[in-house]
Amino acid sequence: MTTATIALEELLADNEASTRKWQAWFADNPAALDLPCAIYNSGTVRGLVKHIFAVELRHSQRLNGEDVTAYEAIPVGSLDDLVAVHAQATQNLRRFLASANDAALQEVIALQTVSAGTLHASRRKLFAHILLHSMRHWAQLSSLLREAGYKTDWPKDFLFSDAIK
């Protein structure tokens, strides 16, 4: 019997395509970054975008067995600063996938989180979490922006992803 799967590479490609769209949208709508936002107690949309990218970066460092950047050390200034965090995380995730075998993906590691203390998860689950976490928060952000009068102009469901055309 075959197991139906979605490749981690597909989810990563979707995350990259989605982030490029958000980056272009925020470049055209920079004031939206400073809108109030209570999601994850972020304070502003900029704070939530930092949170999305910080989780990508910090967990990607954990996947690769690297020192984890302190949350407070992650820049929140310009859009370019924020997107650079995402770019580094994506590089880390691609590097992990290039070298990971089944044993590495199944290995359970301990991770210290900002909000939930120490957790244990397989590297495969952590990788999937990174991408699903981003997807979930982008969906929340879409609703918040729409309610504030900012409309985005592209479908965000995975079904419409550039990754599966």
Image (spheres, grey):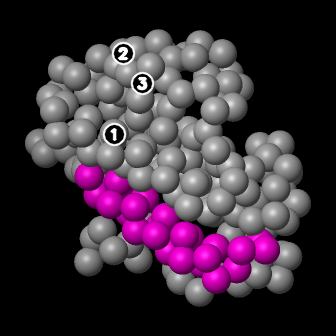
Q: Main secondary structure of the magenta part?
A: helix
In the rendered structure, which segment of residues is drawn in magenta?
A: 9-32
Circle 1: residue type: Asn
Q: Nearer the viewer, mark 2 or mark 1?
A: 1
Which one is in front, 24 or 17? 24
Residue 54 is drawn in which quadrant?
top right
Amino acid type at circle 2 is: Val
Q: Residue at x 28, y 70 (%)?
A: 164
* SS label for mark 1: helix
Figure check: 140 above or below 156: above
Pointer 2 residue = 108
Disc nearer the start of the sequence (2/3): 3
Mark 1, residue position: 92
- Mark 2–mark 3 distance (CA, rounded to whole Å): 11 Å
Q: Is residue 21 left or right of residue 79?
A: left
- Of the numbered discs 2 and 1, the one sitting upstream in the chain is 1
